[in-house]
Image (tube, rainbow, N blue to C red):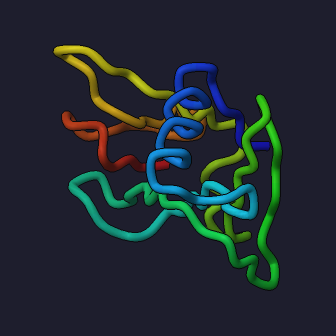
Amino acid sequence: MVFVADSAKYKIVELLSKEGLGEDYFVRVSVTSGGCSGLTYNLDFDNESKPNDQVFEDNGVRVVTDLRSFLYLCNTTLEFSGGLNGKGFYFNNPNASRTCGCGESFAV
């Protein structure tokens, strides 16, 4: 399961509305090679499902990820931090053994 914190939910709803994207859009999360720790998170809006997608709904938000990425994202919570020192969207990933200083990449 991929979880969505209240902070992320409110920002996702705001962005979907601002971009004029309909209810058929969802949050697509994936993990790719890269970054200073080895793996990087990707987050985007999408409206096309692919074979082998893993689909979750938490806190009223639909989150979709490919099967390979789900192995790294299991039990991860998508969060959002705003304000002067805010990071924007970030992942609270219990599977990460280390992260880089900027929080953009991780290792398992």
In the picture as drawn, the residue positioned furthest to the top comes out as 84
Q: Does 40 appear above or below 88?
A: below
Q: Position of residue 82 (x, y in %)?
A: 32, 20
- Above or below — where is 94 with respect to 100? above
Is 75 on the left-hand or right-hand side of 77? Answer: right
x and y percent of residue 66 in the render? 68, 70
- Depth check: give the residue in front, 20 or 35: 20
Splitting the image into 4 quarters, where does residue 72 fall? bottom right
> Looking at the figure, which quarter contains the N terminus?
top right
- Residue shown at 42%/35% (left/top)? 90
Res 70 quadrant in image: bottom right
| Residue occupying the point 46% across, 55% down | 19
Q: Is residue 10 left or right of residue 51?
A: left
Q: Is residue 105 above or below residue 98?
A: below
Residue found 82% across the figure and 50% down from its top = 56
Percent coordinates x, y for residue 106 in the rendering: 38, 47
Q: Residue at x 74, y 82 (%)?
A: 50
Which residue is situated farthest in the bottom direction here?
A: 51
